[in-house]
Image: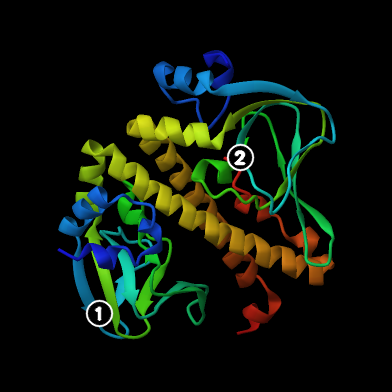
Amino acid sequence: MVKIEDLKRINLLKDVPNHLLEIIANEAQLSIFGIDTQLITVNDKVDTFYMLIMGQVLVKKELTAEIDVILDYIQSGSSFGTSALIKGSKASYTAICQEPCEVITLSGKRMIQLFETNHELAYYMMLGVARQYKRHMDLRAQMIIKTLDENPELKEDINDIENLTLVI
Amino acid sequence: MVEKDVLKKIVFLKDLPGSVLEKVGAIAQLETFDEESILFRQEQEQKLLYMLVSGKVFLNSRSGSGKSLTLDEVSYGRTFGVSALMGEAVSTFTAICAQTSSIITVSGDQMRELFESDFEIGHTLMQKVVELFKSRMDRHTRQFLNSLATHPEIKQV
């Protein structure tokens, strides 16, 4: 169990009404993870949804046997492991604590169970996750646009930006 | 008001039960926009969700130096302007009709009111948005990494 005040520090939960935060608080655990703890492993099933209270988590993916590409640094207030909230979904990255991290965790299996009976909770959680994806997609699109602005000759090589335009 | 048969042509809605389509149809409008009509502009408040029934729409973005870049050509059956659905009303792109287009529009506010009056609908549709966004992000990451892996400088490492 965690305090509602702690949940209110998480961006994804900012519009979640208090009566739903109480349900989440009852299901959640507050954990401390040491530096270099691997929380998520690429291509594995993700069992836990993580909300970072303090610390920093590195998100990476292997490019070659010798090279890893760092995709993101997750900061306090952000969430990760959304695959845990989607049935049959696997991790698309590896997540490692870069420093000691204070993290609120939720069992994905338990949350999916709750979603089946409490659609209000499911709706608000999914709305938060969708907004988070949108922010990431917007950020990537902006980075690509900036790069193309500075290097227009790259335009012909870029064929994947439509993935980020939020057309569904 | 938009009939169920028209809504079923929209990929985002096609699997929904008839009763849900009726509720969406009741708050939706079918409109025709001329070629070069601007539906919404980048960084401006976005209030409507758009579903393309026929025609074509370009999604453009203006860079810092003022150049316009077409990022996507929306074809029929697709939905855009999803920012309105999430209550985050600032648009990321400019949407302009590339030809005369028939488009279903729904107010984002009314759609969210519908979700909040029937959370099961809200859950179903928002989960769909999340799964589509996740799949898009994952695909984009894979394509980005493939491009990097084939870069000559990386190959030399």
Q: Amino acid at mark 2?
A: Lys
**Circle 1 — which element?**
strand
Determine whether, in the image, residue A93 is placed left or right of residue B48: left
| Quadrant of residue A93 within the rendered picture | bottom left
What percent of the width, then of the height, locates residue A158? 72, 59
Vertical position of residue B11 compared to residue A43: above or below: above
Chain ID, mark 1: A
Q: Amino acid at mark 1?
A: Phe
The label shown at residue A33 is: 1
Vertical position of residue B32 compared to residue A86: above or below: above
Quadrant including the N terminus of chain B: top right
Q: Is residue A160 visible?
A: no
Q: For the point 23% across and 48% down, which residue is it?
A: A19
Determine whether, in the image, residue A94 is placed left or right of residue A29: right
**Circle 2 — which element?**
loop
What percent of the width, then of the height, locates residue B52? 66, 29
The label shown at residue A166 is: none
Chain ID, mark 2: B
The label shown at residue B47 is: 2
